[in-house]
Image (tube, rainbow, N blue to C red):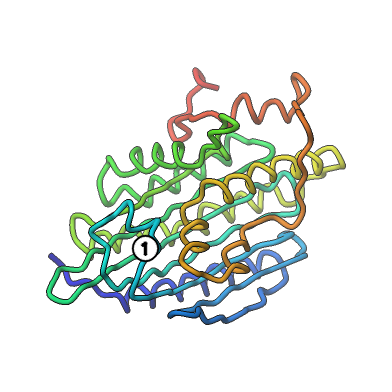
């Protein structure tokens, strides 16, 4: 079994945050502001936010590293073996909310957790992934997003992408609405096999693939003309994003329950959003097409004429 190297993970995550912020700043023309913070009880992070940019209405790229001698009860209830252990949790989490409704919102997260106790083997795992939330769907964008995701997983086994894709489809699902949040991507958690070095390499491959997956979609859609109708629909769909993050998202719940920094945890929420009572799209419209074609699980990599 390869040796657990916590510092190597932290070094990678800090560099990943730098790389993503630099690339998105170049695309937008505006830079991220940084807010370094400390957590009472141990740890801290770097929250970076870009607001009111040319392309990005609001985007956040957060690094956090928190630690302590006791996990919240919600964590030990599901993992009783963690009781009585010191813990460290670190990760990079980002959400980009573009201004143009034809540019999809994107989310990515890679994280590492370790719990230790003298005289016992450490308990550790990796988690993360990335997913896409379009307001107006395009097959070529979905195919590119998923092909990039598959390529990131392939060196680690042909079974990885289908497993993580299905996990993503099932995780980013609003049960009370009975609809997916978007077109998915990758999601994984509790990854600690076959060994630390391999699991860490898979996490890095997924983290490094976010920009190649997202930037070409931005460039294709950023100059699309839109009007009030498209903007209204974007704000309506953003409501679903807020509902998921506040009701179901594990990272949000863990952060709030473990005494994390609220401003950084809630940076994922969009700047403007709308809830309309009993709203439904007009039959045959672009908005209806999102629900009919894109908010359904689909094999985007192997899209054929038959399932067009």
Q: Which residue is drawn at 86% across and 42% down?
A: 227
Q: In which quarter of the image is residue 135?
A: top right
Q: Residue at x 58, y 45 (%)?
A: 244
Q: Is residue 303 above or below residue 76?
A: above
Q: In which quarter of the image is residue 168?
A: top left
Residue 194 image point, x, y percent? 18, 55
Q: Is residue 132 left or right of residue 288?
A: left
Nearest the camera: 134 or 235?
A: 235
Residue 237 image point, x, y percent? 70, 40
Q: Is residue 180 above or below residue 120?
A: above
Q: Quadrant of residue 74?
A: bottom left
Q: Which residue is drawn at 65% across and 52% down?
A: 218
Q: Residue at x 75, y 26 (%)?
A: 281
Q: In this view, does 110 lie above or below 171?
A: below
Residue 103 image point, x, y percent? 68, 48
Tag 1, which secondary structure? Answer: helix
Q: Is residue 79 left or right of residue 304?
A: left
Residue 179 image point, x, y percent? 57, 31
Q: How crowded is mark 1: few (under 14 residues within 10 Å), some or many (20 or more)?
A: some
Q: Name the residue under label 1.
A: 204
Q: In this view, does 220 lie to the left or right of 37?
A: right
List the single residue furthest toward the right: 228
State which quarter of the image contains the N terminus: bottom left
State which quarter of the image contains the C terminus: top right
Q: Is residue 248 left or right of residue 35?
A: left
């Amino acid at each position: 079994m390869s040796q657990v190297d916590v510092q190597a993970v932290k070094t990678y995550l800090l560099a990943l945050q730098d790389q993503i912020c630099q690339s998105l700043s170049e695309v937008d023309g505006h830079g991220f502001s940084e807010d370094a913070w400390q957590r009472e009880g141990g740890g801290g992070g770097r929250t970076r936010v870009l607001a009111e940019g040319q392309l990005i209405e609001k985007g956040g790229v957060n690094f956090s590293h928190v630690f302590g001698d006791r996990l919240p009860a919600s964590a030990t209830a599901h993992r009783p073996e963690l009781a009585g252990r010191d813990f460290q949790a670190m990760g990079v989490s980002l959400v980009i909310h573009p201004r143009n409704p034809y540019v999809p919102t994107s989310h990515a997260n890679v994280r590492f957790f370790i719990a230790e106790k003298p005289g016992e083997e450490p308990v550790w795992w990796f988690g993360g992934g990335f997913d896409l939330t379009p307001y107006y769907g395009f097959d070529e964008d979905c195919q590119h997003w998923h092909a990039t995701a598959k390529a990131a997983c392939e060196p680690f086994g042909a079974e990885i992408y289908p497993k993580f894709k299905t996990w993503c489809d099932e995780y980013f699902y609003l049960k009370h609405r009975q609809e997916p949040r978007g077109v998915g991507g990758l999601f994984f958690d509790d990854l600690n096999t076959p060994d630390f070095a391999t699991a860490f390499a898979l996490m890095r491959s997924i983290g490094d693939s976010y920009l190649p997956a997202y930037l070409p979609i931005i460039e294709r859609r950023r100059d699309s003309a839109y009007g009030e109708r498209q903007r209204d629909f974007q704000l309506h769909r953003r409501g679903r994003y807020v509902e998921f993050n506040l009701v179901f998202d594990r990272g949000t719940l863990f952060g709030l329950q473990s005494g994390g920094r609220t401003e950084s945890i809630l940076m994922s929420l969009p700047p403007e959003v709308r809830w309309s009572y009993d709203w439904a799209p007009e039959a045959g419209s672009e908005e209806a097409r999102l629900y009919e074609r894109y908010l359904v699980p689909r094999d985007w990599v192997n899209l054929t004429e038959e399932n067009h």
